[in-house]
Amino acid sequence: MAILRIIKYPEPELRQSTQEVPLAEVGAPGIRRLVEDLVETMYSHNGAGLAAVQVGRPERIILIDGHVAGGAEDAPPVVLINPTIEHLADETETADEGCLSFPGIFVPIKRSLQARVSAYGLDGKCFTIEAEGLYARALQHETDHLTGRMIVDFVGAVKREIIKRKMKRVAREEAEEAEESPARRVSDAKTL
Ligand SMILES: [Zn+2]
């Protein structure tokens, strides 16, 4: 397994078009390895979720932390391949949302309180999730990544400029850190 570099906004790969994983390849070694690397990358950054496009891969694969998904503290992450949002409840809630591609930035985002999502698992079987609260929010956040939509797209022009400026600083710091200590692990607050 490997910890992959998480792509930060405004790097253009975050807006690349994504592709469904062909069903014949769902359980194949290449996809399994990618999922293992995504899991390790998400945990090393203390993330609550991650989309493959955040490490520069076009496959439509997302992960949600097992605890966020309603499991025990050490529950394995939920792996969703080719996820589709089937239904979003009308009832919404606004809460601050972070993203591993925007370290240190939180944006209030209105999301549906409940979401029904279907996807394929690594076993090649289709399953459906009825999620609520943070789980539903995380699913909406990660599926947004698959269409190139990110937290910066929920703010006005002024705030977007502030975020862009902060992210330039993050990019500078990341470049400096890479020179100093390439193996340093990042520990963010719970972010998606
Ligand atoms: Zn994100």
Image (spheres, grey):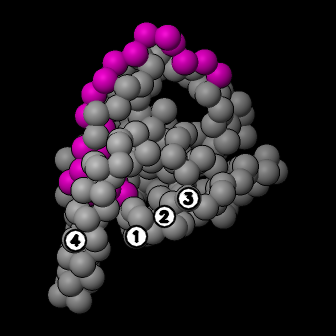
The disc, 2 or 3, on the residue closer to the chain's N-terminal end is: 3
Q: Which residue in the structure is indicated by mark 4?
A: 169
Residue situated in front as seen by the camera: 107 or 130: 107
Q: Are marks 2 and 1 in contact (CB under 8 Å)?
A: yes
| SS class, disc 2 | helix
Residue at mark 3 to residue at mark 4: CA–CA distance: 21 Å
Cα distance, mark 4 to mark 2?
A: 20 Å
Q: Mark 2 sits on what residue?
A: 55
Q: Residue at x 71, y 30 (%)?
A: 126
The residue beneath circle 3 is 15
**Left or right placement of residue 74 versus residue 77 in this view:** left
Disc 1 residue crowd, few under 14, some 14–19, many 20+, Cα 10 Å: few
Question: Contact (CB < 8 A) between labels 3 and 4?
Answer: no
The vertical placement of 93 against 33, above or below, is: above
Nearest to N terminus: mark 4 or mark 1: 1
**Which residue in the protein does label 1 denote?**
5
Mark 2 or mark 1: which comes first in sequence?
A: 1
Which SS class for mark 1? loop
Residue at 23%, 89% (x, y): give it.
179
In the rendered structure, find residue 47 and report the number of the disc placed on it.
Answer: none
Q: Quadrant of residue 19?
A: bottom right
